Image: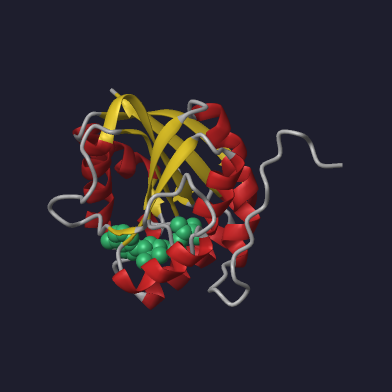
Amino acid sequence: MTRPDTPPTVAAPADLPFSPAAERNAPHILRVLQGWLPPAAEVLEIASGTGQHAQHFAQAQPQWRWWPTEAQAAALPVLQARCAGLANVQAAQVLDVVAPAWPVPAGAFDAVVVANLLHISPWPATAAFFRGAAQALRPGGCVAVYGPFVVPGEPLVPSNAAFDADLRARDARWGLRSLAEVQAVALAVGLRLADRCDMPANNLLLRWVAA
Ligand SMILES: C[S@@+](CC[C@H](N)C(=O)[O-])C[C@H]1O[C@@H](n2cnc3c(N)ncnc32)[C@H](O)[C@@H]1O
């Protein structure tokens, strides 16, 4: 039975690029974000990819205004098409985290959310991400980062070790990041790690707040 508070489902065109992994992890990420973010929030998403997370989260939380972004302009039509029926999704914008200035208002967001970017970009993108996120956040806001990490003192499970090796073979600048090193670059821009949620498939969802 449909619960009375279940928002209407917005169908996206069937032929859009589709990520099975994004579809699988979306409900798990949403459940954690619902505990971390206020019921009404301005949310900047970095590296929105296929837009499945934007669609899923914005649909579930009509009072979150979702700002999807992508590094490549070519990705925007897919984002636009997937979120077309959702009034609480802003027009998708080009945002490359390493750009000197992000094309979004400073100090305006309750949350900056990113999934699966830090290990699929050169290391300087991680520092650039936190620098931009710190500027985008309003006081009391948080940064949520989802993905696999190497956690010093904890064994790296074989699937994550294999994923790391595969990433590095594809691009020597990529690879799973050390959580300690990520914490250091975040702290350098005034963000401290406040929460860690262990997620399915050996991923983490991490929340940073003002130090
Ligand atoms: C593995 S996909 C993740 C997409 C989506 N967040 C998800 O979890 O399904 C990585 C995404 O990062 C984007 N990306 C790569 N480098 C970037 C950069 N410098 N700034 C912003 N996005 C970037 C890519 O275009 C790609 O969409």
Check the image and name the residue furthest to the right. Answer: 1
Instruction: Pick whichever, 181 or 198, lies toward us.
Output: 198
How many numbered marks have been drawn onto this rendered protein structure? Answer: 0
Query: Left of 131 or right of it: where is 205?
Result: right
Answer with the quadrant where ligand 1 appears in the image. Answer: bottom left
Query: Eyeballing the image, is 154 above or below 50?
Result: above
Quarter occupied by residue 61 = top right
Foreground pick, 184 / 34: 34
The spot of residue 187 in percent (x, y) is 25, 32
Residue 12 in the image: x percent, y percent? 59, 65
Spot occupied by residue 137 in the image (x, y as percentages of width and height) = 28, 33
Q: Is residue 156 left or right of residue 108?
A: right
| Horizontal and vertical percent position of residue 92 | 36, 58
Q: Residue at x 25, y 38 (%)?
A: 136
104 vs 17: above or below = above
Q: Quadrant of the N terminus?
A: top right
Residue toward you, 24 or 147:
24
At x 20%, y 50%, the residue is 102
Residue 139 visible in this rendered orientation of the protein: yes
One can see residue 172 in this view: no
| Residue in view at x 30 percent, y 43 percent | 181
Which quadrant holds the C terminus? top left
By what rule are the colours in the image chosen? Answer: secondary structure
